[in-house]
Amino acid sequence: MSENIDKIINELHIYEKKLLKSVETNENKNPEEIAKEARMDVKSVMSAAGSLASKKIIQVNKIVDDTVSLTKDGERYAKGGLPERKVLSALFTQKKIPMKDLAIKSGIDNKDTKIAIGWLVRKKWAKIDKGTINLTEFGEKSVNKEGNDEKLLELLLQKGRIKTNDLDDDLLKGLDNLTNRKNLIEINNKTLHKFKILDNGLAILEKGFDIKEEVTQLTSKQLKDGSWKNLKYRPYDINAEYPEFFPGKGHPLRKIIEEVREVFLNLGFTESNGPILESAFWNFDSLFQPQDHAAREMQDTFYIKNPNNSNLPEKDLVEKIANTHENGGNTNSEGWNYKWSEEIAKQSVLRTHTTGISTRFLKDNKPPLKMFSVGRVFRRETITYKHLPEFHQVEGIVAAEDINYQNLLGVLKEFYKKLGFEVRFRPAYFPYTYLSTECEVYLEEKESWIELGGSGMFRPEVLEPLGVNVPVLAFGLGIERLAMIRYDISDIRMLYKSDIKWLRDIPISNGIKLD
Ligand SMILES: N[C@@H](Cc1ccccc1)C(=O)O
């Protein structure tokens, strides 16, 4: 120490020096007093103290200085006695009391009966048997014995506020007991800091040092009059604490949507869109979904009262689709064999998927084409960790002469790979595709596979009425679940909560795997 004491002094920060000097005059000062005296703020005092302590120049002692006081309820019990005590006294003379007569027979408030019974049993003063409260032997012995909780209540009533450090073992047990009850006492936690100068500190003080204000900024005046030459400059402290700050950033769900868009734009897909308030015609009929299909039922789909009568497209197309449903129309299929209703097709729904955008797009655009769309969809789902009644899908189609099912799997694999997901494919069924596939991803935490979305080759019954005569691969994939896995959240609802902490803690970079 002695050889390098000059070096240590030299490296002391001005706040450390000020603190040392201040503590030297009196070791009993608290940080607030030191701050005032040395014209520092309390935070600087504490960080200087921490730094001096780490160099073994001073020692920082933390002293718990909690105080306890009564709440309003606590005061009421302290004055009138604990309800179980009152019941115990009543039991002493009556031996047993029917539960329903408790308030009248013991003179406690109705609202206290539950509490009284609970504590009578906990304190083993009474036993409950078939709706009757019976005094126990232990209860009988306790009649004239004040409990530690009661002693503390009394003391608090006398003194108002007590330091927990001043409580003896018995009263500390009482404190424990009272803390276990709701709302009787209030504990005010406080920690005091006391500083003690260690030998190293004494040596430094003996050696002596001066406190020269350090400048952090040069003025033009100092430069002109030459005083800059003699100034002491505060060195940069790259370990200094800095206030936390939270830069603005996109919402994680928004970010993943942008990523998804980027993937498809880079793959040469055209972006399209469609209405959220959709006709049943585009949402269901154009997809060869029969009008009595389960997914169309009220419990699955949000039907809209106003407007309840959507417009249908040109008659020719409506007729073709109606025919295809009824008898297969110009396709080789037999259709669904029922009487197609225009009324049902005109119903307004909140779109249950974005697949209607694909049929709308195919009506207006000639293949070859690649189209994708991102949008909200709505289903009457019960909310769970993986289900929301409202979520986003990315929909897409590729239509061209040589497109086949293998290409579909290829596109999906590529898409998920670009986002950093490994998926498996499972055979599936949709009324509008054949073959059909569901993509799934494994969720470690839930130890199960979860569905990410559906896909398939559009059936001729979908394509023929739209005038499309090339194969079309199609997919509709959920986006929230991707966000859920990417950001490692076990509950999908998190994405729609204003949970500031979670949003702040998510790194700015969106964690895309770059290859
Ligand atoms: N529309 C289906 C997904 C899908 C889209 C396109 C083809 C096949 C399936 C769904 O919402 O689950």
Image (cartoon, rainbow, N blue to C red):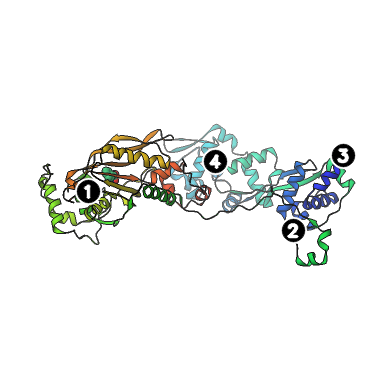
In this view, the mark in front (1 or 4): 1
Q: Quadrant of the N terminus?
A: top right
| Residue type (three-letter) at the residue carrying disc 4 | Leu
Please name the residue that numbered disc 4 is placed on.
88
* Nearer the observer, 101 or 68: 68
In this view, the mark in front (4 or 2): 2
Residue at 76% across / 66% down in the picture? 220
| Residue type (three-letter) at the residue carrying disc 1 | Arg
Please name the residue that numbered disc 1 is placed on.
296
Q: Is mark 2 within 8 Å of ligand 1?
A: no
| Residue type (three-letter) at the residue carrying disc 2 | Thr
Q: Secondary structure at mark 2?
A: loop
Indicate which disc, 2 or 3, sits on the residue closer to the N terminus: 3
Please name the residue that numbered disc 3 is placed on.
3
Whether pointer 1 and pointer 4 mark residues with C-beta atoms closer than 8 Å, the reply is no
Whether pointer 1 and pointer 2 mark residues with C-beta atoms closer than 8 Å, the reply is no
Q: CA distance from mark 1 to mark 4?
A: 65 Å
Report crowding for label 1: few under 14, some 14 to 19, many 20 or more residues within 10 A (C-alpha).
some
Q: Is mark 4 within 8 Å of ligand 1?
A: no
Residue at 37% across / 43% down in the picture? 384
Q: CA distance from mark 4 to mark 2?
A: 72 Å
Indicate which disc, 1 or 4, sits on the residue closer to the N terminus: 4
In this view, the mark in front (1 or 3): 3
